[in-house]
Image (cartoon, rainbow, N blue to C red):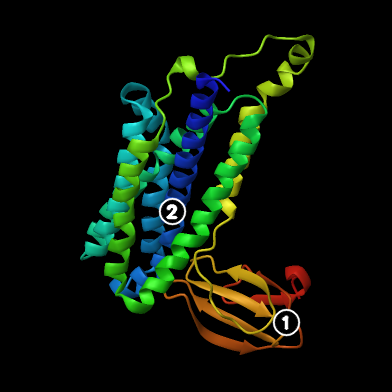
Amino acid sequence: MTAAVVGTKRDENRALGVACGAHALHDGYTDLIYVMLPIWQNEFGLGFAALGLMKTVFSGTLAGFQIPAGLLAERFGTAIVLALGTALAGLGYVFAGLSTGVITLVGALFIGGLGASTQHPLASSLIAHAFAGSRSLKALGTYNFAGDIGKMTLPAAAALLFVVLPWRQALMLLGSFGAIAAVAIYIAIPRFTDRDAAAPRKSSGKAHRHGVARAYGFPLLLSIGVIDSATNQEIRTIPVPDGPHGLVITPDGRKVYVSSDGASTVSVIDTRSGHVIRSIGVGSSPHGLAFFPQPGSYSLGHNGVYR
């Protein structure tokens, strides 16, 4: 085995390790916010609108600065941008632990989202530089799996820390991991150049025939990503009687009515507090719900058919 081959293999391992580590930590930080939302609601007396604003600030900053993060990496290098982004992501949670009110908390989430915006574009491009052709499929699969590990591990670690520490101290401790990881990323990341990227293969008849199909690959992948990010997260669970089935929201958005066919009741949930404020006994096995145009009138029936 030549020295060049050994060096390439070493760079591949380092690239995969850095990308997977960064993905696990950043995705863990991203999902940690779901653990913190009910805590912040109770600590600062927030309504659902304020919680939604906080989540929007973090997620919007994370999404909006991904392209600028890529441009910065082109100019200053992936190592420094990804390392600083990781440090900022952790620093955001340190500041959140020090926050004294909603304004400082929103600022902390902005900082965290700004740092988190660097991971996906830079870590995935690191994999693309290190692995060529079909070998990149396994590497990308491992990279994506590492993110799921982070989503599971960091929120679970936070829940365990809350048993022995106040939430502020626990959050600052978890945030400090970002600084440690930033140093490790900067040291370990391989310094690829454009010349190191896999050279494009010569075109063939088969490649030409599939050229049109491949042109749709990126828009399709983008659509899948948007749908997945928009639907795969749960913010809060509100207990209701057995067998929740139908759901309807009042036009003013203040109440949610949930039918429970296992308990023959309809629960009324206040959207500001997230609590069940009333339980209405109805006939056996209520299913669908519908809101009548007449103020205060509802329908109980199968799939919301008016009765």
**Residue 278 makes an appearance in the image:** yes
Q: Position of residue 35 (x, y in %)?
A: 43, 66
Q: Indicate the quadrant where residue 174 lies.
A: bottom left
User: Which residue is identified by label 1?
Assistant: 261
Residue at 43 percent of width and 53 percent of height: 30
Q: Tell me the CA gap for discs 1 and 2.
A: 36 Å
Question: Relative to the observer, which residue lies in front, 258 or 126?
Answer: 126
Of the two numbered discs 1 and 2 in the rendering, the one whose residue sits closer to the viewer: 2
Kindly identify the amino acid type of the residue bearing the numbered disc 1.
Answer: Asp
Q: Quadrant of the C terminus?
A: bottom right
Kindly identify the amino acid type of the residue bearing the numbered disc 2.
Answer: Thr
- SS class of the residue under badge 2? helix
Residue at 70 percent of width and 87 percent of height: 264
Question: Relative to the observer, which residue lies in front, 129 or 39?
Answer: 129
Q: Position of residue 279 (x, y in %)?
A: 58, 87
**Residue 226 makes an appearance in the image:** no
Q: Position of residue 92 (x, y in %)?
A: 29, 53
Question: Relative to the observer, which residue lies in front, 190 or 88?
Answer: 190
User: Which residue is identified by label 2?
Assistant: 30
Q: Position of residue 267 (x, y in %)?
A: 59, 82
